[in-house]
Amino acid sequence: MFAYDKPYVVNPSAPAESLEAKHAQPDNGLDVPSPDRYYTREFMDLEWRSLWPRVWLLAGVTSDVPEPGDYTTFQVGHESIIVVRQDDRSLKAFYNVCPHRGNRVALNDMGSASRFTCAFHGWQFATNGKLACITDEESFHPDLVRHRPGLAEVRCDTVGGLIFINMDGKAPPLLDWIGLPKGYIERYRIDEMNVVRHVVTEWRGNWKVGVDSFYETYHLPHIHPQTQGVMEDFSQYDLYPNGFSRMIVPICTKSHRIGDQETVTPDLQYMMTEAGMNPADYHGSAKDVRATVQAAKRARAARLNLKHYEEFTDGQLTDSWATGLFPNVQIGMHPEGVFIMRFLPHPTDPERFFYDNMTLYRYVDDPNYFVPGWMGLPKDTDVTGATRPAIERHGVDDRADLGPVLNQDVELVAAVQQGARSRGFRGPLWSEQESRVRHFHRELDRVLGLKP
């Protein structure tokens, strides 16, 4: 069982140097924060001053900008950032704003350009941000434009196929700031994956309610009972420096809450099919399905010459390593693909946020290699990576096709947001199953200067 002083461990025999090993738990105290952080404009303004400009923010993925001139844009609150591939293959980032009158210079989510041209007055900028042309420059006093106003550059760096930006330019080097073990992100080779679906939906809640909801599995048996037949809702929680964290969620196994641990159900048979197995050939119990699926995936990878599978532990072949990148990202990490969630603040309303979800997949052209069901992709999705799909955008009252689990989360977040304002709610009481949530808020308070 899971006790507050005896944390759940997925693999007690994992060597200490293994990425699967349980990480030592820091003492984050037992503070109960005021719920006003979830709804007041004062707290929102504090975040705009002291959080968003100061940290590294996940702005995109490198597969979206493969060639020189390719660009992608990133919106966080009232700021829009352009990330563009340079001729020397490096990346640069700029505020998406013309220095003349403040108009956006990139109006699309992504694309390719030899120059950025402001649609307002035709000013042009090279992809390295330098001013290329001022329309009717002779009509400007020379002293006004003598400094050759180009696009304002934003600090930019990458790790393992992920693109980060830092607006104030004062954050530590990216690799120093990422609190995960060395090589943790790189092992998944996200740079070899392609975005196969990208959905942005507006939710009725503060962005932190979104983070809180996805940072624990304590709620699974109550909000998502359909998951009980294929995953354990006790997770291994690991807390790392700088607010980073992860939970290892065992999959291809039944929850401990289910009495019958022997019968192989259709749900588990489906998981075996995804691994290239024929369930009819399996005669073991439900308790052994997870290990059998791991062995089948490893054998399939060897047959297909997928060398990167050799770098993963057996647990990584089945389980979800849901990894939190402070402040506002969770990535469900799997050898076949990753599920990137960004919880982005609304520019003006502290009780709204944007749930930005990118699904990336490593395509393998083999009839025995399947898109995992956990991705929740519509049946007609092109997973080859040949075409980058457009971003699907949905307003706060739209019924987006997010799948049954995420649709349940939309309703949950709205209800929690309403309750945060109640006079009867004095602040969250986090159990050890919610230790990632406490860890996140502890780091948030530190960055905001509310705690040492």
Image (spheres, rainbow, N blue to C red):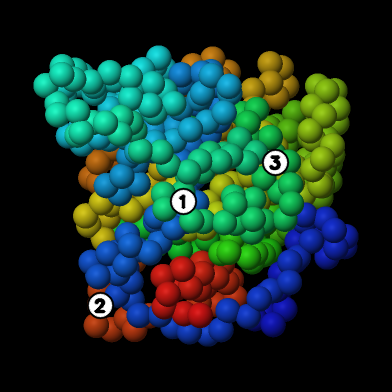
Asked if residue 380 is positioned above or below residue 150 in the image, the reply reads above
Which residue is identified by label 1?
169
Q: Quadrant of residue 362?
A: top right
Q: Residues within 10 Å of mark 1 (few under 14, many from 20)?
A: some
Which residue is identified by label 3?
186
The Cα atoms of the two marked residues, 1 and 3, are separated by: 24 Å
Which x, y percent locates residue 63? Answer: 55, 27
Which amino acid, mark 3? Glu
Secondary structure found at label 1:
loop
Give the residue at x 72% y 55%. Answer: 181
Q: Return the residue found at the far front.
A: 143
Q: Residues within 10 Å of mark 3 (few under 14, many from 20)?
A: few
Which residue is identified by label 2?
422
Q: Is residue 145 visible?
A: yes
Which x, y percent locates residue 195? Answer: 52, 28
Which x, y percent locates residue 86? Answer: 51, 23
In the displayed structure image, the side of residue 255 where residue 18 appears, left or right: right
Asked if residue 255 is positioned above or below residue 368 in the image, the reply reads below
Q: Nearer the viewer, mark 1 or mark 2?
A: 1
Q: Give the quadrant of the N terminus.
A: bottom right
Q: Residues within 10 Å of mark 2 (few under 14, many from 20)?
A: few
Which amino acid, mark 1? Gly
Which amino acid, mark 2? Ser
Tag 1 and tag 3, C-beta contact below 8 Å: no
The first of marks 1 and 3 along the sequence is 1
Q: Quadrant of residue 301?
A: top right
The Cα atoms of the two marked residues, 1 and 2, are separated by: 39 Å
Q: Which mark is residue 248?
A: none
